[in-house]
């Protein structure tokens, strides 16, 4: 488990192991979400970085014959 200490300026350092695993670099933006007594940091990705994220998924959806007018 990784722990961090809040500085007097209310700053924390994201451990290198976590930064590497999530590919977080200096200057990246993170969304801060307070949730049920904890803080979640979610890396924000640009549309360009998300291109191809769904490549290879099955797009076939079963539809009943009367689901369209």
Image: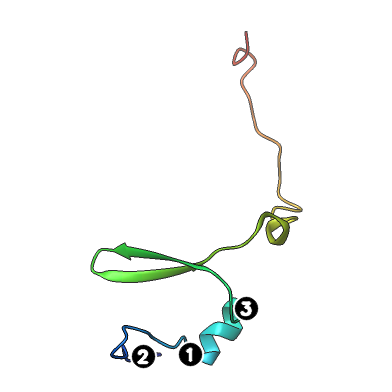
Q: Residue at x 59, y 16 (%)?
A: 67
| Vertical side of 47 occupied by 27: above or below | below
Crowding at mark 3 (Cα within 10 Å: few <14, some 14-19, many 20+): few
Tell me where residue 29 sits by quadrant. Answer: bottom right
Left of 60 or right of it: where is 6? left
Q: CA distance from mark 2 to mark 1?
A: 8 Å
Secondary-structure class at tag 2: loop
Q: Position of residue 17 (x, y in %)?
A: 54, 90
Q: Which mark, by number, is residue 15? A: 1
Q: CA distance from mark 3 to mark 1?
A: 12 Å
Secondary-structure class at tag 1: loop
Residue, disc 3? 23
Q: Residue at x 32, y 91 (%)?
A: 5
In contact (CB < 8 Å): disc 2 and disc 1? yes
Nearest the eye: 40 or 6: 6
Residue, disc 2? 4
Q: Residue at x 39, y 86 (%)?
A: 12
Q: Residue at x 75, y 55 (%)?
A: 52
| Vertical side of 19 occupied by 47: above or below | above
């Amino acid at each position: 488990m990784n722990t961090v200490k809040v500085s007097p300026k209310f700053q924390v350092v994201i451990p290198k192991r976590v930064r590497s695993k999530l590919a977080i670099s200096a200057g990246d933006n993170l969304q801060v979400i307070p949730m049920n007594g904890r803080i979640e940091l979610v890396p924000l990705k640009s549309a360009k970085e998300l291109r191809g994220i769904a490549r290879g998924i099955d797009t076939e959806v079963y539809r009943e014959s009367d689901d369209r007018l």
